[in-house]
């Protein structure tokens, strides 16, 4: 049993059935080993998820041959690359909810974000805060969209939101009532790029 075999088998489980189905006991059974034998290669499920995330990022998150020279554009390009790679692989969504799980293969892109924000005038400390804001926005957007998509594939009934918006009181909530019939298609639009640009602009706007 090798680490490569462990990662390959674990990846198949999370891809086909989701992260919740991955346990050390299940993984050992799939490989034909015992949970105790697995612990010689990985400490626990959390470390295994980090290995999976790092393996996926190493294969898919590529460094561009020529990053943008403008620091603001470099920040946006790095965040967009992270978003595109993670959004394309549904099982990463469950891993992202554990905030301290980080792929070392993504650190080059994190460097571009922090360095770009610093070059734009933020102090190193505030550049880290800026990165965190960008990361929370990116991860949150992926989580919300993936959860909504998963719900739509398993339940065709109107959502709770649909039922609420169908019965809004225009006297109490005039603006929402005006938008009620367009709310679902509007919120289903992919506005990540627009939101990211607005977020970065806000981070770099001086505040008194």
Image: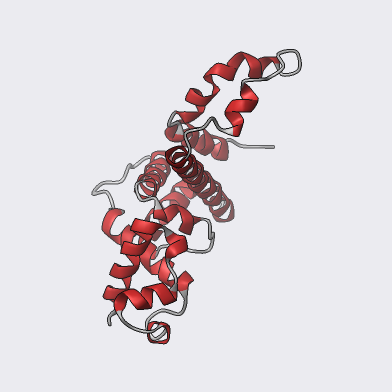
- The answer to which of 181 and 3 lies nearer the viewer is 181
Up/down of 58 relative to 79, above or below: below
Residue lying at the far right of the rendered structure: 172
Where residue 191 appears, x then y in whole percent? 45, 31
Give the quadrant of the C terminus.
Answer: top right
Q: Nearer the viewer, residue 98 or 120?
A: 98
Residue 123: give x, y in percent of width and height.
56, 51
Residue in the picture at 54% in, 48% down: 136
Image color mode: secondary structure
Is 19 placed left or right of 2 in the picture? right
Residue lying farthest to the left in this orientation: 65
User: Looking at the image, which residue is at 38% across and 60% down?
Assistant: 14
Total numbered badges shown on the rendered structure: 0
Q: Quadrant of residue 73?
A: top left
Question: Is 62 above or below relative to 160?
Answer: below
Q: Residue at x 30, y 46 (%)?
A: 67
Inspect this view and state whether residue 54 appears: no
Residue drawn at x 51%, y 32% as measured from the top left:
157
| Residue 134, percent from left and from top | 51, 46
Along the line of sight, the residue nearer the viewer: 200 or 208: 200
Where is residue 98? Give x, y as percent.
53, 60
In which quadrant is the N terminus drawn?
A: bottom left
Q: Is residue 161 visible?
A: yes
Q: Horizontal placement of 137 versus 63: left or right?
A: right
The answer to which image quadrant residue 174 occupies is: top right
Q: Is residue 161 above or below residue 133?
A: above
């Amino acid at each position: 049993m090798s680490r490569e075999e462990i990662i390959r088998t674990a990846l198949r489980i999370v891809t086909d059935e989701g992260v919740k189905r991955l346990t050390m006991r299940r993984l050992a059974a799939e490989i034909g080993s015992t949970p105790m034998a697995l612990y010689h290669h990985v400490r626990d499920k959390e470390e295994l998820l980090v290995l999976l995330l790092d393996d996926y990022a190493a294969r898919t998150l590529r460094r561009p041959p020529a990053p943008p020279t403008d620091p603001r554009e470099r920040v946006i390009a790095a965040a967009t690359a992270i978003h595109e790679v993670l959004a394309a692989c549904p099982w990463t969504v469950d891993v992202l909810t554990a905030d301290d799980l980080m792929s070392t293969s993504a650190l080059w892109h994190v460097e571009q974000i922090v360095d770009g924000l610093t070059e734009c005038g933020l102090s190193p400390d505030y550049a880290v805060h800026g990165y965190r804001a960008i990361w929370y926005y990116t991860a949150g957007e992926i989580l919300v969209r993936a959860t909504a998509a998963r719900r739509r594939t398993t339940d065709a009934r109107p959502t709770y939101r649909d039922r609420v918006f169908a019965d809004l009181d225009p006297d109490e909530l005039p603006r929402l009532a005006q938008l009620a019939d367009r709310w679902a298609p509007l919120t289903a639009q992919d506005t990540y790029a627009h939101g990211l640009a607005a977020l970065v602009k806000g981070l770099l706007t001086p505040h008194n």
